[in-house]
Image (cartoon, grey):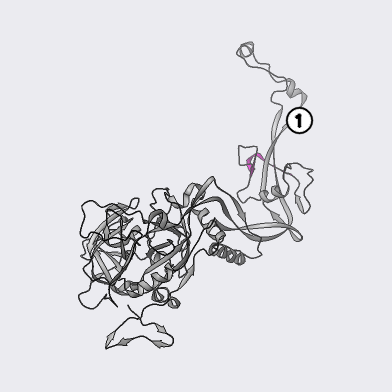
Amino acid sequence: MKRTLALGGVAAGLLASAAIAAPAHADSVPAVNLANTNFAAQQVAAFWFGQAKANLINATPYTAETTVSAKHVSTGGASADSKAGVVGSSGDQKASTGTLKNVNLPKTTGKVFFVGADGKSHWCSATSVQGQYKNLVATAGHCVYDTKSNAATLDKWVFVPGYYEGKTPWGIYVGKTAYTHYDYSVYEDGDRDYAFVTVYNGVIPTEGGTSGGKYASRVYRSKWDAYRAKKKLQADKTTALSKLRVVETSRLSRFGKETAVSVADFQAWNKGKNLTDPNGKWTWGTNASAPKEISKNEYRSWKDSYVSKDGTTLFWRAKVQKSAPAAAASASPTPSASAQGNGYKWHPDQGSFEYKYFSRTFTAKVIKGYQVVGVKLSIGLKDVGTLGSNVGGQGLAYNQKIGTGIFEFGYPSGSHPDGNYAFSGKTQKWAYGKTFKAAAASMKAQELVGIKSSFTGEGSIGSAWLYRYSSAKRLGYLNGVTIAVSDTDGNNRIDTNVSPYFDGETLAVYKTAAANWSGKIV
């Protein structure tokens, strides 16, 4: 849906009795920081490289706004707003057209990884695009902006060209700034569901690899304060913290009340001390009750000690000498000669010991509170250069006529509606089709273009639509990005992929993004 943009207080609208969409200007292209400092970017890289790349390997396809009800549009719909044109790729050429029998896959295609609203790692497809600083990535807008929870952007955003099962052949490229159309960031207009993201130079781990440790925040008096701190940490792009949770904690204080405490807390305050010692010298502010003798039936374990389920009571048993009468002791029979011959060793005091069972609880002068705990990562990184220098960059095509032949490249995964899993998402795939006008009401999109494609939605979102693709040079011109898939004929098989129509306003967003430098993070 094209909307007029206010420029200098004058609305650009009807011109010569025809609705002309005003081109986007730099000041009307929203730019949002993903990781705006070197330290922040280093921590994002650490998050994905750390723990043997577990967050990369365990990531799942992003499922927000994938399968929609789309339809062909016979009148109206997508249209050019000026003359057709292209911006050159990193190896500009007169590419061949038409369907090729053998298609060499582009090096520019890869996956973008991020943390979603559910706190889990996910991925979309994306591609490297040529720009002044060789630092530009294009994908679907909702693979950058969190439309699911209405947060500004998805967290810890990176691009990995050529990703395959934990391998990062050209390194990881941390997102710096995301650029999109005003109508998408403000209205979530599906007709503008695309984003151009500047990325820092790529990095790989040094030989030192990754390391980490436990994280613990200061103690908060209320659970509400702790959860607020947790949310702030999760949103802080200068950290690489994971598995954050809020736990109840206690700290010793002369202002505290004498309160029952857990065995674990008491032991932590009395490191190295024997908690069964009846005369223990305990740390200031802590105290233990006198050992209480209990019956064998009250003791619930075969171990020598254990802690109650609620963690507050210590139970133990001790072997003590029986106080048996002398007559009873002298009456103990001596083993027979045959028993002794079979290796039985008899001792006069055998049977003179027994177990006694005890329990005790613990108190301390404490102030109770809440703490945020989790895991932190640190990492040694090595710069591997710009994205475009390593994999090249696709050009950009805009205002192309409907019916143009398009190659689609991405990482489709997931099943068709009938349950058939046609794609795994592990390897890059391609499709070819000619564009037609389409619409998807659920995405507020009336001016889309579609192609016939069996790419299933999970994973294929953000796939590159390349015009005039050269299989020899593996380059062409980006003329769309997959934003949704559809079963248009109702046979429970995905048959159509849709994209925003790239026009002059798309070009303006691209130019704004391409004019911004990113630099190194190490």
Characterize the local packing of mark 1: few (<14), some (14-19) or many (20 or more) Cα atoms within 10 angstroms: few
Residue 305 part of the magenta segment: yes
Residue sitting nearer the eye, 21 or 50: 21
Quadrant of the snapshot with the C terminus: bottom right
Position of residue 407 in the picture relative to residue 63 (left or right): left
Quadrant of the snapshot with the N terminus: bottom left
* Residue 331 seen in render: yes
The image position of residue 12, as x and y in percent, is 36, 85
Q: Quadrant of residue 19?
A: bottom left
Residue sitting nearer the eye, 247 or 503: 503
Residue 317 part of the magenta segment: no
Position of residue 36 in the picture relative to residue 83 (left or right): right
Amino acid type indicated by mark 1: Ser
In the rendered image, the vertical position of residue 208 relative to residue 407, given as above or below: above
Disc 1: which residue: 323
The image position of residue 137, as x and y in percent, is 40, 62
- Which span is picked out in magenta? 291-306
